[in-house]
Amino acid sequence: MNAKYHIWTEGCQMNVADSQRVSMALESLGYQFTEKAEEADVIVLNTCVVRQSAEDKAYGRLSSLRPLKAQKPEMVINLMGCLVGIRNSEPLRQRFPFVDVFSPPSDPGPLIAYLTQGEAQAIESRRTAELAAAMDGDFLLPERERGKLVSAHVPVVLGCSHACTFCIIPSRRGGEQSRPAEEIVSEVRSLVAQGVKEVTLLGQIVDRYGKDLPDGPSLANLLRILNQVEGLERIRFLTSHPNYFGDDLMDAVAELPKVMPHIEIPIQAGSDDVLKRMRRGYTQADYRRIVERIRQRIPDSSIATDVIVGFPGETEAQFMETYRLLEDLRLDSAHLARYSPRPGTVSARNFPDDVPEAEKMRRFRMLEELQEKIVGEINAQLLGKQVTVLFEEKVKGRWRGRTPTNKLVFVESETNLRGQVLPVTITWSGPWSMQGQLARKQTNEFPT
C-alpha cells in the first residue's frame, strides 16, 4: 500500500501529542507521511480554538483544501480537535460538506473507522487490536520521528473540569479524566526504547492528576514512579494551577534527580477583582506566597507564568497590578495573550469585551518589554557559567538544547549531539536564548 497522509497541527502541546497518535494509527494501516498536502490520500487538520486567531487559521486552512478536494474527490479530509469538540458537529458538517470525517480531540477512532469500513474482517480486527494496544500505552512513534525525537509529550490528564470563565477547553475537550498510571508508565517506557530522553507530562491542570481516580496516585507519586524508568533522563510537567500545587509536588521536584526544576504555574492576572471574574480561585497574595515557597524549597528552579491582558472590565489600575506583580516576582518566562472572547464561555456570555484592541495591544507590549528586560538580566547571570544541556536537534547549523530550567541554548559542533546531556559554558546570553561552548569532548552515539 502506497497511500499517504498529511497532518496539519495547530495549538498546544496536547494537540501535538494527539497528532502523534493519529500518525501512529494511520501508519498501522499502512499509510506513509508526506509533507505535501496535495500528495496525500488522507489529510488531517488538528485544530485549536483557544483564541480567535487560531480558529480563523483553521477555517482558512479548511477553505484552502476545498479546491484540492474538488480535484481529488477520493481524498479523505478529517477535521479534528477543539474546533470539532465533543458535542454537536452538525453545524460544521453543513458549513464544510466536503469534509469526510469529524473527530473530537484525542480520538483518532472516527477516522480509523471510516478508513477501515470496507476492509476484510480479519484485517480490520488485527489493525483495531494494534490501535487499541497503542492507545493503551504501547506507543510506537511515527516513522519520521523514531530514533530522532529526543523530547516527547505524554498526556496524563485529558480535558478539564475547572471552568475558568474565559476558557473553552472544558466544553471542547470534556471533563477531567486522568489516565491510569500503568498506561502512562508503559507509554514512557515505549518512548524511551525508541530513543526519547525526556518526557513532558501534559494536563490542562496537570497537578490535578489522579484526583478523579479511585486510589490513584497523585502527580507527585507518578513522578516518583517515572523517575525509576531506566534510560529516561529528564521529566517535566505542565501546566500547573496555583490551587493544587502542594508541598508533596514541591518535594518531588526538589528530591527527584530526573524531574527538572522548571515550574509552569499561571497567574493570568495580578488584580484580585479580575481573578475573581476569571473564576481562578486564588488571590494575588496567594500566588506570591506560592512563588516564595517554590523558591525556598527549590532554590535553583525557574518559574513560568501565563498572563491574559484586556480581560473584560480590566481597568488601567488593574492592569498595572499585573505589571507590578511581574516586576516584583521576576519570573523566568511569561506567556502573554490578549483576551479573546470564546463562544460558549461564561465571560463571552456575561461580560462585554470592553477593552479596545489597541489598548489590549498596548498592555501586551508593556508586559512584553518588561519581561524581555527581566529575562535578559536573569540569563546574563549565567555568562561564563557551566550548565547541563540536553541536545534535541540541529537547526541552521547549530545544535539546540535546553537546560534543566528550560532555557534554550545553541552550540556549534560538528559532532552529533542528539540525545546527549552535556556540560556547556555560556558565552552569550539574550532574553530568548543563549549560546555556549561544549565543556568537553563527546561521543557520537546517536544517528542523525
Image (tube, rainbow, N blue to C red):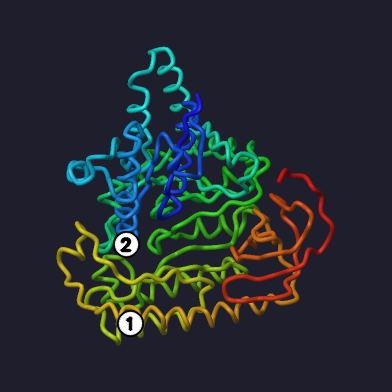
Say above or below: 290 vs 49. below
Residue under the point 51% across and 51% down = 220
Q: Residues within 10 Å of mark 2 (few under 14, many from 20)?
A: some
Q: Which mark is residue 407?
A: none
The circle on residue 319 is 1
What residue type is disc 2 on?
Arg
Residue 336: x, y in percent?
A: 41, 71
Q: Are circles 2 and 1 on residues that touch, CB within 8 Å?
A: no
Residue 437 is drawn in which quadrant?
bottom right
Q: x, y percentage for residue 164? A: 28, 61
Closer mark to the observer between disc 2 and disc 1: 2
Q: Which mark is residue 51?
A: 2
Relative to the observer, which residue lies in front, 369 or 113?
Answer: 113
Q: Is residue 142 above or below residue 264?
A: above
Marks 2/1: CA distance? 20 Å
Label 2: state its secondary structure.
loop
| Quarter-of-image position of residue 45 | top left
- In the image, what residue occupies the spot 54% across and 72% down? 332
Q: Position of residue 286 (x, y in %)?
A: 39, 72
Q: Is residue 173 left or right of residue 323?
A: left
Say what amino acid the circle numbered 1 marks: Phe
State which tag comes first along the sequence, 2 or 1: 2
Q: Nearer the viewer, residue 100 or 15?
A: 100
